[in-house]
Image (tube, rainbow, N blue to C red):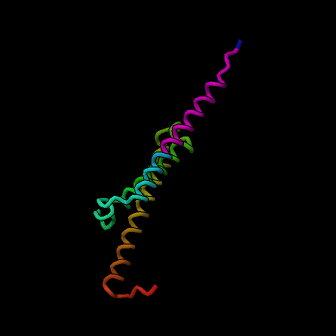
Amino acid sequence: MAHDTTHGEHSGSKKRIWQVFIILSVLTIVEVVLGIFKPDFLVYNDLVSLTLLNWIFIILTIVKAYYIVWAFMHMEHETASLRRVVVWTAVFLISYLIAILLIEGDYIHDIYENSYMTWDF
């Protein structure tokens, strides 16, 4: 008589889905709680022209994006080289875009603060 492994495979998949759901939910709840309460030590302390709270949001968003790619694109089952190509390329591109946004945003803010242009909008 053949051994039925269907039930075991489905229970493992369900467990994995719940694990992913709980991890992503906890990260999102942390972001929401920080966004609602905005602790003073995170809002009024800067690191590289950005508040610590904003850095936490950026880092948590990148972690969630990485985990979504890892779990839902099944990267944990792929070879190490394919994982590196897909995941690290995205991480570097996102980091580069964030750096450009911060640099250009700080430049535009300085232009308006130093009265080269007026805040007429």
Residue at the extreme right = 1
* Quarter occupied by the N terminus: top right
- Our reading of the magenta stretch's main secondary structure is helix
Question: What range is drawn magenta here?
Answer: 2-24
Q: Position of residue 10 (x, y in %)?
A: 63, 30
- Verify whether residue 21 appears in magenta: yes
Q: Position of residue 69 (x, y in %)?
A: 52, 47
Left or right: 49 with respect to 68?
A: left
Q: Residue at x 48, y 51 (%)?
A: 28
Which of the two residues, 21 or 80, is positioned nearer the viewer here? 21
Left or right: 116 with respect to 65?
A: left
Q: Residue at x 52, y 47 (%)?
A: 68
Q: Residue at x 59, y 33 (%)?
A: 13
Left or right: 27 with respect to 52?
A: right
- Verify whether residue 118 appears in magenta: no
Q: Position of residue 6 (x, y in %)?
A: 66, 25
Q: Position of residue 20 (x, y in %)?
A: 52, 41
Q: Residue at x 41, y 63 (%)?
A: 98
Residue at the extreme front = 37
Q: Disc count in the image?
A: 0
Vertical comparison of 76 with 99: above or below = above
Vertical comparison of 103 with 1: above or below = below
